[in-house]
Amino acid sequence: MSFDFDQTIPREGTASVKHDGRTAYFGTADVTPLWVADMDFAAPPAVTAALVARAAHPIYGYTRYPDSLYDALIAWMQQRHGWSVKREWIIMCPGVVPSLHAAVMAFARAGEGVIVQPPVYFPFFSAVTSSARRLIENPLRLTDGRYQIDFGHLEHCAASGAKLLLLCSPHNPVGRVWQHDELVEILRIARRHKLVVLSDEIHADLVYPGQHHTVLATLADEADSLITAVAPSKSFNIPGLGLSCLIIPDPELRAATGEVFASQHVSASNPFSIVAFEAAYRDGGAWLDALMAYLQGTRDFVLYYARQHLPGIRPIAPEGTYLVWLDCRDMQLSDPALRDFFIHQAGLGMNPGTVFGTGGSGFMRLNLASPRHIIAAALARVSQACGFSG
């Protein structure tokens, strides 16, 4: 099957945060929106067909999770990630962000520490601070154009009374795919200091050739306290449907997490999210493979173009995700001025690095999951705004 990722699909007027929310976020709609982490590509045909078929039935009542949904998820994890998941380990959830909050509430009391590794997706911070837990930062280190975990400092953080580590794997926004030895070291530290680890693996399927995503849980011992968050939302461009799951082998951790969701009376059951979730995992493999080939081409184009035409901007080559972390520090602009440059001179709407916390100053996050001609035109405007004609 072939899929047309070069097709331009207008999204204005669909209540899209990414497109219809431009004026509210950037102060103008006159920017190319390359910010919110969803894709400007049509979802897999199998997903659309499943949604149309479900919509054809005119009753949209309360919905249970069918056996076939669990079967599709379990088969995907086995085939794509070599992880044998048991059905009883799975808790269906209304998204990964609510799951971060649930884990913080379940495994750290008010005032107790939760470790995050900035620069990182900003709900990692709010999940801690909004629930009156103590935020402990273990900043990533940028060395020779690649981010690393400071394990010595992580050990210090864990020893300071932390109860939970929120791990982003693969990492948003810096694009790292953590390697086997790095994950083993995380487990060693967590084991030594009795940390619960929530591993957000929502980008696990979006990994480029030459890299391999390892599910943290596949390296764990039975005594390790691990929670794995997964979802088809990023992989298959269905984040607006809001269904994810937590995979928790330990029954005590599973019960504690479930109690938090129950106390909030939160339900993830939705007739449309359920059929899309199942169809994506069951029939979306060929589409995802084609997507990754297309994204690789766009990523490589961005890296090449920046080297040739964007002085002062150094993209950090992502090993996974469809996000590119741009190092703009050589432009020698303040963060407000940097944001203003991209909005008003280059006409480009991106997330400023400062929203990702410590280490984000001087950076911007570029979402490259749009038709390549849109990315190329956006970069050309940046080059022109920089006054570079080489």
Image (cartoon, rainbow, N blue to C red):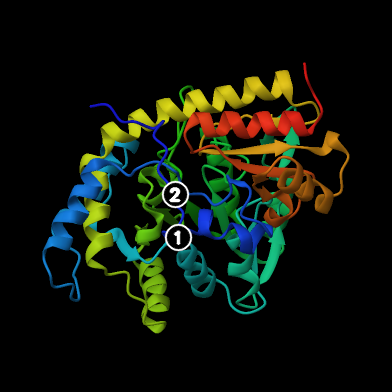
- Residue position marked by numbered label 1 in the rendering: 96
Which quarter of the figure is the C terminus placed in?
top right
At label 1, which amino acid type do we have?
Answer: Val
The residue drawn where x is 57% and y is 44% is 171
User: Element type at marker 2?
Assistant: loop
Q: Residue 74 at x, y = what percent?
A: 24, 48
Sequence-wise, which precedes: disc 2 or disc 1? 1
- In depth, the one of 150 and 70 nearer the eye is 70
- Whether residue 28 is visible to the viewer of this picture, yes or no, is yes
Where on the picture, by quarter, is residue 315? top right
Q: Is residue 177 left or right of residue 48?
A: right
Q: In this view, does 60 lie to the left or right of 249?
A: left
Q: Residue 26 at x, y = what percent?
A: 67, 57
Q: In this view, does 298 lie to the left or right of 83?
A: right
At label 2, which amino acid type do we have?
Answer: Ile
Which quarter of the figure is the N terminus placed in?
top left
Q: Distance between the residues labelled 2 and 1?
A: 8 Å
Q: Residue 367 at x, y = what percent?
A: 56, 42
- Residue position marked by numbered label 2 in the rendering: 202
